[in-house]
Image (cartoon, rainbow, N blue to C red):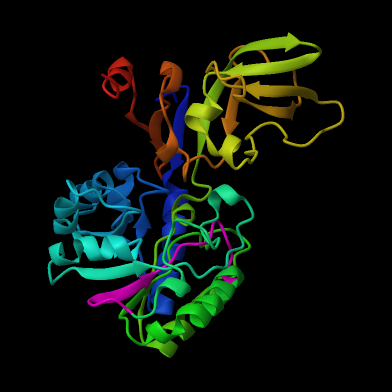
Amino acid sequence: MKIPSPCFVLDESKLIQNFELIDRVQKEAGIEIILAFKGFAMWSTFPVVKQYIKGATASSLNEVKLCNEEMGVKSHTYCVAYSSDEFEEIVSRSSHITFNSLAQYHKYIDLVPKDVSIGLRVNPRWSDVETDLYNPSSPVSRLGVTSENLESLPERVEGLHFHVLCESDSYALEKVLESLEDRFGGFLSQVKWVNMGGGHLMTREDYDTKHLIDLLTNFREKHQVKVILEPGSAFAWQTGDLYTRVLDVVENGGQKTAIFDGSFTCHMPDCLEMPYRPKLAEGSDEPVEGWHAYRLGGVSCLAGDFLDEYWFEKPLKEGDAIIFKDMIHYTMVKTSTFNGVKHPSIGILRKDGNFELIREFGYEDFKNRLS
């Protein structure tokens, strides 16, 4: 089957390779690794996922339901704030419930069944994340309780949770744990589990997995706690691309812009928010002597829906393919239909080499999000 455009295409073999590494880490370290839907929620892959991962973390009622229905288990649930009209359903569908603040804990504690494990998110006040938009560890962050505001561990709290990393290495985690022990060490002997959140990019080629395994093993044994990790990017890291094609080439003021049938603001918002520049399957994000320079522009009417110049060996023309690399994690989950821009189709390149189209999107998908 021909791959439509635009289309997110996941490579099943690469996904399995990532899960095999993640499974090895959790077994050798004696910990539990669960899937974070916030980074990867492509539920058509869950039959493969469940061969390696037995649980998932959810941050909304919708994600909780997805965990129940497609993973077949209750979720580890953390929400920045729970809504009164949703909480009882959320907690009934969850195995773990983590509160972001002491006020939320006090509001809902009496509604939490005895068989649901309660956690509290804390702010260890250290992170290697340099982009403020993605850094939850500042002293004025709305995410987690600071040590200054936690004099004692609230009744029935069995776990501590933090999430302050983003595509980080194990040495960054080591520093976070040092800060955690410094600020919350007195509580570690009182809890049963510590959830270290996500941002552990263990499937990156240069990641020191041995150091990670040793670090987690030592922490678990030192504090006699169960350790939980919930990566987002690591599961789907470099497992698939966004296929697009050129619709037009516009030249104004000496600047050539290739308009493609996708959008940064609709389909790849991190490119504008972070910001970062994705690699291309064919083309360079750095100047190459003798190659042709083009800005890449999306089809939305947002003036800023473009990235500055990429370089191509041959001049671009209508119909040429532009394939954005590594566009599965934290990309598919953030798409929108702003401007009515067509949502990319979703497909899987199966391990036997055949392409399977999983879903296409149309007018009804756009219309049904509105009223």
63 relative to 100, above or below: above
**Quadrant of residue 79 in the image?**
bottom left
Give the residue drawn at x 41%, y 17%: 340
311 relative to 188, above or below: above
Which residue is at the front of the view, 274 or 280? 274
| Whole-percent x, y for residue 251 in the image | 74, 10
Residue 169 shown in magenta: yes
Residue 84 shown in magenta: no
The N terminus, quarter of image: top left
Residue 292 visible, this angle: yes
| Whole-percent x, y for residue 84 in the image | 19, 49
Which residue is at the front of the view, 211 or 176? 176
260 relative to 125, above or below: above
Relative placement, left or right, of 120 versus 254 is left
**Quadrant of residue 9 in the image?**
top left
Magenta span: predominant SS is loop
Residue at the right extreme, as displayed: 289
Relative placement, left or right, of 116 versus 258 is left
The C terminus, quarter of image: top left
Residue 54 visible, this angle: no
The boundaries of the magenta stretch are: 153-170
| Whole-percent x, y for residue 336 in the image | 42, 29
